[in-house]
Image (cartoon, rainbow, N blue to C red):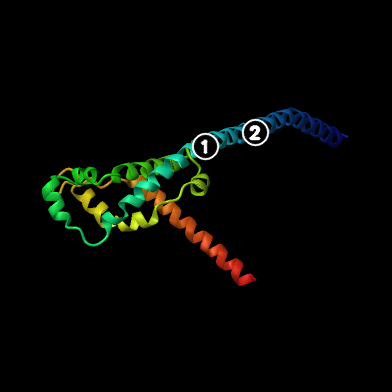
Amino acid sequence: MGNDIYLRTAAVSLIVAVCAIAPALWGIYQRVDQLRLAEEEHLAMTKLNALGLARGLAVEDQEMQVLVEGLSSAFQGKPDLRAGLAEAGSGEAMAKALEGFLPVMEHYDQLGAMVRMDYLPFDLCFATIDFPEAFWKGSENFRRFVKEHWRGEGQAELDLWREMEFLREAYAEEWVRIASERGKAASSE
């Protein structure tokens, strides 16, 4: 009989504990669900805002593409960068003297910063903005030289256009991913 009372007391204690914990668990579940819904709403608003931003950036990017076309001949051949530095005095002055170069670099550097800081989703950027790969490759020697002598001979500014480099790497990874998917699709046909 004493054992029976002990079992009943234990069962009642367990029921009381469950009844006390159940509302707390229900409250936690509701709060987590509210946070999830708030996060989804925030993400939807961010995407809507990014869409407007991307539309404006796409228009600006068309202007940059025109500048890029105009710059394409500047990087053909082997320009004498040392002579350019001697004449201009600094890499910055060399970059400024090449009409259109700095606006293009700043445009893609700002895009890279917006993507890195999640102000602009990369997938939206990739879908609306054409990265100027030919310009990137063609201007490589010039960009490197200008960075190494930005403030004057041997006075580097190594983090210059770092965000554009980040953006270019993201585009390159996406190009590889797409090529891989196309390769898989072609091999399965």
The quadrant in which residue 105 appears is top left
Q: Secondary structure at mark 2?
A: helix
Q: Tell me which amino acid carries mark 2.
A: Leu
Of the residues tagged 2 and 1, which is closer to the observer? 1
Residue 21 at what x, y percent from top left? 72, 30
**3D distance between C-alphas at marks 2 and 1:** 20 Å
Residue at the image position 37 percent from the left and 42 percent from the top:
107
As drawn, is 107 to the left or to the right of 159? right
Residue at the image position 33 percent from the left and 41 percent from the top:
106
As drawn, is 39 to the left or to the right of 10? left
Q: Secondary structure at mark 1?
A: helix
Mark 2 surroundings within 10 Å by alpha-carbon count, few (fewer than 14), some (14 through 19), many (20 or more): few
Mark carried by residue 155: none
Q: Is residue 81 above or below residue 52?
A: below
Residue 113 at what x, y percent from top left? 40, 41
Q: Nearer the viewer, residue 91 or 69?
A: 69
Q: Which residue in the rendered view is the most extreme toward the right?
A: 1
> Mark 2 = which residue?
37
Q: Tell me which amino acid carries mark 1.
A: Ala
Residue at the image position 63 percent from the left and 35 percent from the top:
36
Mark carried by residue 50: 1
